[in-house]
């Protein structure tokens, strides 16, 4: 246990939070080293240490994001640009102000933990971020996931008068709960983005991923307005300087497949594509750990050490060894760690314009081929469709994979209409000649519950072949339902896996499921995107 003297040595009395409306805080702990954040979190009973040195926290009721509790303030500056609906729920300014005042009242007199950092490795687009939270481990999480920046460089000088010019401020009060009857919220949990003020409120949840995704959501508004394509993707770079992007929703393999021992990791989840090339938005990784093994994912395994955070991972009560196979709390177990924990990470967090783009999808129906080369029209169609499956535990209430269409592979985080992001991506793909592939990391031999998840070793072999150009001279042929062109063979991959429509013994069941999935594609695309795309892109969808 920390002594009072050690605790008081972490307190900063010269940090003025009054500009944020916090006039009478308790002890303010500011910009500490990871060890000091961990000491504070342990002393406060916020978690424990695992045998590998990682800090382990349990987030209680919320073990994933709460998308139904996310709001954007309908204020004049951004209101006309936002795509309002079930993802971007409006909150009127008249409702926001009382909620903000109650949050500020909650924070008065409490010990607070402040992390100043930034987002975006490209200095031209860097955004200062200040996180003020009531949990020490949340400050550690923010420090691990965001980029290092001193307070002055971030724009958080104490005499700064313009709060918007100071960047983004996140007030995270996990112990405060909304009153739905009073606040008009869906529940007592809330994530509210005020884009004009550069302010985010998070309350009623301890799930730290809300902090990370709030930053991404804000940048998905700001950067496209500057002509930067924001992307929910991982990125790495080969020895020859060739950059590759890995798009996909949570659970499709972005983090796993981009952590390649033969390539330098730029980042595992969020990137921008500007005129200068690719840059990481973050300074760390947020990896799923369910069924993690040293043999299967050595880079991620080795990155989880002192200074890292484990969320909802079960520990052996005697040895404190993490049991990554135990999902008693959630299947969405997570590890947060800085990029410096990854062996061979790209130190600049930047790369050249990508030669290869991979769309990762987790097909729960077991009908999509594991690898397909896309035409430019197909690339735009599948980017706008964003088909995958919600993986168990990623969101509250999801118990097993569900087919879903998340436009741009990032629907929960996009304030602007999808066409804005698609146009930016299509423009850059055309300009730089990037080749786009669709990679299915889901089920083969049958749907979820009957087939099996495509082995990671085979997926890695397909990705290696794409990046090495080993498929350039291979014959491709179309499959009958989706018009996707699949290779006849691929090094280290069984031939029957490549063309599931020919390999399945239950051909009638396969055809029925393929037709059903094709119908879902058509219905979703016509509902949300048809008025905004060309006829050529519309025809690039399933043929059924």
Image (tube, rainbow, N blue to C red):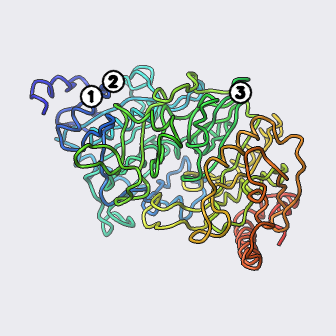
Tag of residue 352: 3
Instruction: Identify the residue position indicated by label 1 in the image.
Output: 16
Mark 2 surroundings: few (<14), some (14-19) or many (≥20) residues within 10 A = some
Q: Quadrant of the C terminus?
A: bottom right
Mark 1 surroundings: few (<14), some (14-19) or many (≥20) residues within 10 A = some
Q: Is residue 366 above or below residue 145?
A: below
Mark 3 or 2, nearer chain start: 2
Q: Is residue 450 above or below residue 113?
A: below
Tag of residue 152: none
Q: Could you tell whether 315 is left or right of 252 in the image? A: left
Question: What percent of the width, then of the height, locates residue 100?
Answer: 33, 50
Residue at left 58%, top 25%? 346
Local secondary structure at mark 2: loop
Question: What percent of the width, then of the height, locates residue 249?
Answer: 58, 53
Q: Nearer the viewer, mark 3 or mark 2?
A: 3
Circles 3, 2 touching at the beta carbon (< 8 Å): no
Front-lying residue, 174 or 341 = 341
Q: Could you tell whether 58 is left or right of 509 in the image? A: left
Q: Nearer the viewer, mark 3 or mark 1?
A: 3
Front-lying residue, 257 or 393 = 257
Residue at left 66%, top 27%? 351
Q: CA distance from mark 2 to mark 1?
A: 7 Å
Instruction: Identify the residue position indicated by label 2 in the image.
Output: 158
Circles 3, 1 touching at the beta carbon (< 8 Å): no
Mark 3 or 1, nearer chain start: 1
Mark 2 or 1, nearer chain start: 1
């Amino acid at each position: 246990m920390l002594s009072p003297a050690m605790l008081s040595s972490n307190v900063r009395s010269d940090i003025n939070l009054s500009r944020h409306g916090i006039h009478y805080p308790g002890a303010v702990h500011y910009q500490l080293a990871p060890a000091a954040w961990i000491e504070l979190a342990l002393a406060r009973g916020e978690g424990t240490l695992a045998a590998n040195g990682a800090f382990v926290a349990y987030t209680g009721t919320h073990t994933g994001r709460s998308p139904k509790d996310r709001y954007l303030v309908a204020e004049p500056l951004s209101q006309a640009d936002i795509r309002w609906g079930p993802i971007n729920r409006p909150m009127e300014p008249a409702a926001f102000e009382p909620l903000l005042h109650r949050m500020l009242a909650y924070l008065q007199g409490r010990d607070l933990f402040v992390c100043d950092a930034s987002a975006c490795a490209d200095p031209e687009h860097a955004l200062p971020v200040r996180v003020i939270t009531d949990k020490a481990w949340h400050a550690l999480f923010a420090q691990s996931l965001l980029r290092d920046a001193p307070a002055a460089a971030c724009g958080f000088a104490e005499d700064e008068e313009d709060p918007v010019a100071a960047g983004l401020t996140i007030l995270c009060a996990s112990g405060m709960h909304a009153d739905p009857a009073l606040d008009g919220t869906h529940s007592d949990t809330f994530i509210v983005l005020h884009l004009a003020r550069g302010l985010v409120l998070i309350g009623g949840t301890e799930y730290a991923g809300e902090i990370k995704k709030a930053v991404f959501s804000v940048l998905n508004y700001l950067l496209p307005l500057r002509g930067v394509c924001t992307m929910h993707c991982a990125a790495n770079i080969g020895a020859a300087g060739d950059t590759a992007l890995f798009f996909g929703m949570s659970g499709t393999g972005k983090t796993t497949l981009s952590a390649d021992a033969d390539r330098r990791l730029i980042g595992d989840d969020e990137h921008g594509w500007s005129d200068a090339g690719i840059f990481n938005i973050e300074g760390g990784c947020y990896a799923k750990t369910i069924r993690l093994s040293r043999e299967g994912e050595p880079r991620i395994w080795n990155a989880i050490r002192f200074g890292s955070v484990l969320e909802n991972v079960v520990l052996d009560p005697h040895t404190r060894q993490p049991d990554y196979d135990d999902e008693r709390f959630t299947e969405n177990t997570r590890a947060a760690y800085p990029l410096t924990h990854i062996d061979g990470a790209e130190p600049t967090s930047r790369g050249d314009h990508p030669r290869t783009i991979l769309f990762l999808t987790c097909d729960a129906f077991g009908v999509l081929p594991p690898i397909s080369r896309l035409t430019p029209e197909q690339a735009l169609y599948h980017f706008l469709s964003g088909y995958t499956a919600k993986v168990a535990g990623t969101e509250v209430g999801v118990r097993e994979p569900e087919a879903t269409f998340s436009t741009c592979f990032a629907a929960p985080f996009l304030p602007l209409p999808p066409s804005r992001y698609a146009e930016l991506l299509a423009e850059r793909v055309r300009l730089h000649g990037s080749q786009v592939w669709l990679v299915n990391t889901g089920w083969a031999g049958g749907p979820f519950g009957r087939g099996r998840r495509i082995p990671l070793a085979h997926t890695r072999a397909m990705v290696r072949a794409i990046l090495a150009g080993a498929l350039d001279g291979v014959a491709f042929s179309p499959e009958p339902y989706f018009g996707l062109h699949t290779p006849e063979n691929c090094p280290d991959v069984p031939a029957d896996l490549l063309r599931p429509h020919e390999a399945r013994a239950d051909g009638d069941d396969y055809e029925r499921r393929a037709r059903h999935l094709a119908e879902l594609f058509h219905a979703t695309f016509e509902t949300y995107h048809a008025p905004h795309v060309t006829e050529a892109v519309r025809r690039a969808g399933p043929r059924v």
